Amino acid sequence: MLAAVLFVYPVFGVLTLTVHDGTSFTAEPVRQIYTSQLSIIVLQRTFVTAATVTAICLVMGYPMAYFMAGLAPRKRVMATYLILLPFWISILIRTYTWIILLGREGVLNKALSALGLTGEPIQLLYTPVAVHVGMVQILLPIVVLTCLTSILDVERDLVKAARSLGATPRQAFWKVVFPLSVSGAATGGIICFILCLGFYVTPTLLGGRTSILIANLIDLQVHKTLKWDLAAVMASALLLATFACLLFYWGLTRKRSEFATGGLAR
Amino acid sequence: MTKMTRRAFGIGASTAAASLAAGFPSFAQETTIVVNGSGGALATMITKIFEEPFAKETGIKVKPTAPVSLPKLKAMVESGNVEWDLTELNGDDVVTATKAGWLMPIDYAIIDPDNKLPAIAKQPTAMVRASYSTVMAFRTDKFGKGKAPQSWADFWDVKAFPGPRSLENSPKGNLEFALLADGVAPDKLYPIDVDRAFRKLDQLKKHIPVWWTNGAQHVQLLIDGEVNLTSCWNGRITPLKNEGKPVDITFKGGALMLSYLGIPKGARHPKEAMRFMKFRMDPVASAAFVKQVPYPGFVPGMTELLEPAFAATLPTSPENAAVQFEFNSAWWAENIDAVTTRWNEWLLI
């Protein structure tokens, strides 16, 4: 009931704005978005950024999780704490620290010029690179933890069995551990992707003019141009995209549990 | 006719209430007006210099809120849930809000009974609170001795004055700066030749890594060495310069802008809000305020209370006003939609 009042009602209000201008029904906001180059490009950019950040997180996160899965339980708990540590610091503060590190007179540029590697300071801050760095740092722990649980879910005995049947460690990994844990890693990837779609603070603070994402564009329509109907259409598009990802995710987890219970028990 | 009578009755009733309140202070203490402003250090000053003495004198308490926001005003008036009794507004927001019917007419018989305020300060739905200037700021340690940019043409000259720059993420002011850099005379800026301004901005686009969105940001960019030049609000740089930081501003080509106070339609205490506006026009308090925050209004008798050397650093001093142009809010309110759409496409793609 509370959820209905606090969530569904406002969302419904936003959805109405997309097709209703206060007096009558209209398709104008949807048409405007559809024909606006800016919103299409920013929407595209949002999805591309989400995809690359997710890919980077998976490429870095999965090996990290695999390494952690191989540790002794006590060490693994320590490692998990270390991974969780950044979660206790606000996203805003973590993002601001990147400004100090990546700036023209920042730590990284100072170090590079002290080592004689660069003459002029390199522009790192206010570029897509900075946005990716900031987003990966925030989302990596989530990916590592989901990958870790799915790797730990794989029965250790299966690896032993593979080894006793003559598989090399490499073969045991690629033929047993990886196929059984890949859907869990994909789950982490989808969570990461969905979170990326709504990122606001990081592109605002670290991005330049061509790094703004859809959330920033919605903010612009609400606060600067006062076109709330356009903001509503964009917010609804984002909501739909998120739902589509969630559906995909549910499909994936269902398949995975079927596989785990049916496949392994057989 | 009915309108007239109701208004007359309203004034009569409020006068009666005011005289009653004078006799019974406990009555007036019930009233609290909500005044919305820019917040931050500015709000602290306003509380100390205006709000507390006002509460002491009239028994009307003032609750300050922030930030200034046109969307919030729109939302309040359109939903009929108006929290503010008074809010700050910038020039083109006044034009937009007046056109949309979000502001109440102001009764200058209450604020300026002796008719001392200059006409420029008295708009039908808003009163000028302060003037400020968007000017060019630069690092004094980056371009060699005695070499400092002096005009928007210098700002555009990336050979003579190398390094990254910043401008506000808004077409307002920037189109004018571009035209000035392109050689347009300050009195020929309006109506703005938008195409020409964008062509000039094209030249500078790749030298601007970041477009600032608030006053704290442009200061930080300059101090951190992230940019060597930026547009800025005049009041933000003077304190840093006084601290010995290598920064300076020039008023040449600056945009002289006005900031207003207005009463939202549907405000609960419009009469009390207007009494507070009258209080804000007190010359002694205004002079004390301007010494802390260099954004002067048009309060008669205030300038006489300031040191001449200090008065010369204000955006409205005759020497500084002469080298700036007057920002045309009416043109912007008329064209803001089309220009902003173009600006966003130009900037963000």
Image (tube, coloured by chain):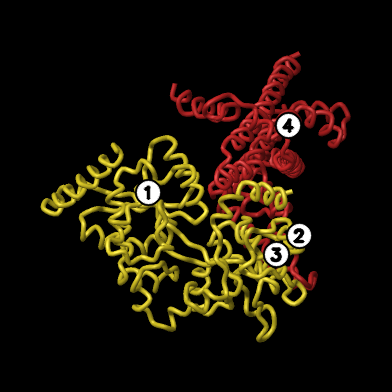
Expressed as whole percent of the image width and height from the top left, the position of residue A93 reads 56, 54
The kind of residue on which mark 1 rests is Pro
Q: Regarding mark 2 in the picture, which secondary structure is present there?
A: helix
User: Residue B345 or B321: which is nearer the viewer?
Assistant: B321
- Crowding at label 2, few (<14), some or many (≥20) Cα neighbours within 10 Å? few
Chain B shade? yellow
Tag 4 and tag 1 share a subunit? no
Residue A65, above or below B92: above
Residue B126, above or below B283: above
User: Residue A153 or B83: which is nearer the viewer?
Assistant: B83
The quarter of the displayed image where residue B179 is located: bottom right
Say which label, 1 or 2, has the lower sequence index: 1
- Residue at which label 1 appears: B105
Label 2 or label 3, whichever lies nearer to me, is 2
Q: Regarding mark 3 in the picture, which secondary structure is present there?
A: helix
Chain A shade? red
The kind of residue on which mark 4 rests is Ala
Residue A65 appears in the figure: no
- Residue at which label 4 appears: A186
Expressed as whole percent of the image width and height from the top left, the position of residue A259 reads 74, 19
The kind of residue on which mark 2 rests is Arg
Residues marked 3 and 1 touching at CB (< 8 Å): no
Which residue is found at the position 72% from the left and 39% from the top? A36
Q: Regarding mark 4 in the picture, which secondary structure is present there?
A: helix
Residue B302, above or below A199: below
Expressed as whole percent of the image width and height from the top left, the position of residue A58 reads 74, 40
- Residue at which label 3 appears: A108
Which residue is found at the position 33% from the left and 74% from the top? B301
